[in-house]
Image (spheres, rainbow, N blue to C red):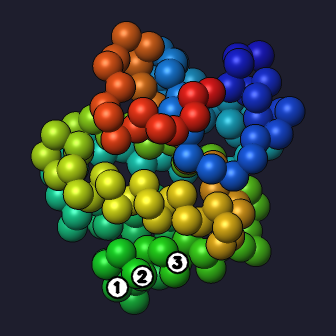
Amino acid sequence: MSSLRALLTEGLRPGVYRWQSDRTTEQARLDVVGAGWDFVLLDTTAIHDKTGFLDLCATAFDLPRWFGRNWDALADSLSDRSTGEPEIILWAGLQHLLEHDHDTVDVALQIFTEDITNSGQLRVLVHEPTDAETPDLLSSLPVL
């Protein structure tokens, strides 16, 4: 059992966390599903802007066609998930998006953080390789 699976088995409070690991996204998915959680992958390694990020969210979270593709619509859609099962969102490639559009990353993190009190279903893990330098924007997030 990986430390991620053990952490999830013990329970993980809603929130946004830095997850420093060299495990692949597929290994993480297996750990999450094996611990009985729903898994959503946000891979922004090929995303450069807000539009791309919101399109990715629409697909990853299986949002309805009428999803407005703006920040308010994303926040509302996430808080509407309160009747669903707790989810682990693995955000891979954040550094790439941060290099192209700092504001998009900043606002997305704010929305995910605010969701802690709205739906209470999301646990967002920002995946960082163990040897990666932590961007200032993430330095205040707790590390798993």
In terms of image quadrants, where is residue 33? top right
Quarter location, residue 82: bottom right
Q: Which mark is residue 41?
A: none
Residue 91 in the image: state x and y as whole percent: 44, 42
48 in relation to 70, above or below: above
Secondary structure of the residue carrying tag 3 is: helix
Q: Are marks 1 and 2 in contact (CB under 8 Å)?
A: yes
Image location (x, y in percent) of residue 113: 54, 58
Q: Label 2, secondary structure: give it.
A: helix
Q: Which mark is residue 77?
A: 3
Q: Give the spatial CA distance, label 3 vs label 1.
A: 10 Å
Q: CA distance from mark 1 to mark 2?
A: 6 Å
State the image coordinates of residue 138 (x, y, percent, origin top left).
Answer: 40, 38
Q: Are marks 2 and 3 in contact (CB under 8 Å)?
A: yes
Provide the residue designation for mark 2: 73
Q: Mark 2 belongs to which amino acid?
A: Ala
- 92 sits to left or right of 36: left
Give residue 103's position: percent from left, percent from top: 23, 57
The quarter in which the C terminus is drawn is top right
On the rendered structure, is 20 left or right of 38?
Answer: left
Residue labelled with disc 1: 68
Residue 34 or residue 12, whichever sits in front: 12
What's the residue at 83%, 33% (across, down)? Answer: 9
Residue 35 in sight:
no
- Is residue 124 at least partly visible in the picture? yes
Three-letter code, disc 1: Gly
